[in-house]
Amino acid sequence: GDKWCDEGLWYYSRHPNYFGELMVWWSLFAFAAPTVPLWTIASPLFSSFLILGVSGVPILEKKYDDKYGSMPEYQQYKKTTSVLVPLPKFDSAMTKDL
């Protein structure tokens, strides 16, 4: 059927793929940091900016809100599932800003 993905890592995070990508960029920076100039932090910062604020999460959140936003099951999924970081399910009041 036509449903959003809420299995596997998507049970714990609405965008675990973006979380993984950010972890790669930040890990590369962390490992290289002792030997590279500090300005190289621009790469993981810029990647984070794009994914979190421009082209990744905001676009998909809007797409799925437009498509599934009227469904109570989807609203419950959004209320109880972290946007980015895979976390255990909590009460919706606790995950509102995650």
Image (cartoon, helix red, strand yellow):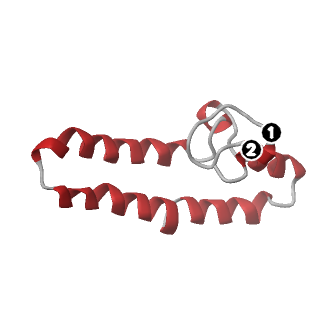
Find residue 10 and report its horizontal and vertical position in percent.
63, 38
For disc 1, the neighbor class at 10 Å (few under 14, some 14 to 19, many from 20) is few
Secondary element under disc 2, as helix, strand or loop, is helix
**Point 41% across, 58% down: residue:** 48
Residue drawn 89% across the image and 51% down it: 72
Judge left or right: residue 60 versus residue 67: left
Q: Amino acid at mark 1?
A: Asp
> Relative to 39, is 14 on the left or the right?
right
Q: Quadrant of residue 50?
A: bottom left
Q: Tell me the residue that label 1 is attached to.
A: 91
Give the camera-side residue of 88 and 6. 88
Residue furthest out toward the right = 72
Residue placed under numbered mark 2 in the picture: 94
Q: Pinpoint residue 9: horizontal percent, then vertical percent.
A: 59, 33
In the displayed structure, 48 sits above or below 2; it is: below
Left or right, 22 with respect to 30, comes to right
Give residue 5's position: percent from left, percent from top.
Answer: 68, 42
Residue lying furthest bottom = 54
Q: Residue at x 56, y 59 (%)?
A: 57
Q: Looking at the rendered structure, which numbered label has been put on residue 64?
A: none
Along the line of sight, which residue is nearer the eye, 6 or 28? Answer: 28
2 and 1 marks in contact (CB < 8 Å): yes
Does residue 58 appear left or right of residue 72 in this picture?
left
Residue 2 seen by the camera: no
Circle 2 packing at 10 Å, graded few (<14), some (14-19), many (20+), is few
**Where's residue 95, x and y in %?**
71, 46
Query: Which amino acid, by three-letter code, is at mark 2?
Result: Met
**Residue 97, placed above or below residue 49:** above
